[in-house]
Amino acid sequence: MDEHGKHVINFQLSLLLYSFIFSTLLFVSFLLMVILIGFVLITILCILAISMGILLIIYPILDGIAASKGEFYKYPLTINFIS
């Protein structure tokens, strides 16, 4: 159970870091909208935001199903902050 908790915390911290980077890029793209480059960046960032939202929903469900079966599930795209 301890390993599952560590991986969940690492996943949440990774997504927090990704969200911080995303919000910084979104702010920069709003600044670049003045010279019309920001529209392309905002389109790309919207696609990334939708995929990040799907990850926030699907991966914890898959982990819960695997944990209830007694299996170990490793989240993809996770940075190991706590080992």
Image: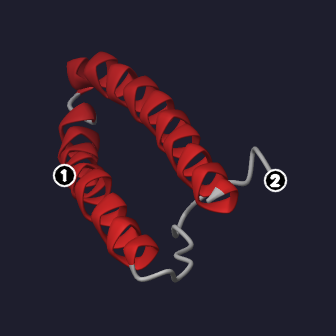
Residue 74 lies, in percent from the top left, at 57, 72
Q: Residue at x 45, y 72 (%)?
A: 67
Residue 79 lies, in percent from the top left, at 67, 54
Q: Which residue is mark 2?
A: 83
Residue 39 lies, in percent from the top left, at 18, 37
Label 1 sits on a secondary structure element that is: helix
| Side of 35 where 71 appears, left or right | right
Vertical relation: 63 (above or below) 12: below
Q: What colour scheme does the image use? A: secondary structure
Disc sitting over residue 21 in the figure: none
Q: Residue furthest right?
A: 83
Q: Which residue is mark 1?
A: 50
Of the residues tagged 2 and 1, which is closer to the observer? 2
Residue 53 lies, in percent from the top left, at 23, 49
Label 2 sits on a secondary structure element that is: loop
Of label 2 and label 1, which has the lower sequence position?
1
| Side of 48 where 71 appears, left or right | right
Between 82 and 48, the one nearer to me in the picture: 82
Query: What amino acid type is highlighted by mark number 1?
Result: Ile
Query: What amino acid type is highlighted by mark number 2?
Result: Ser
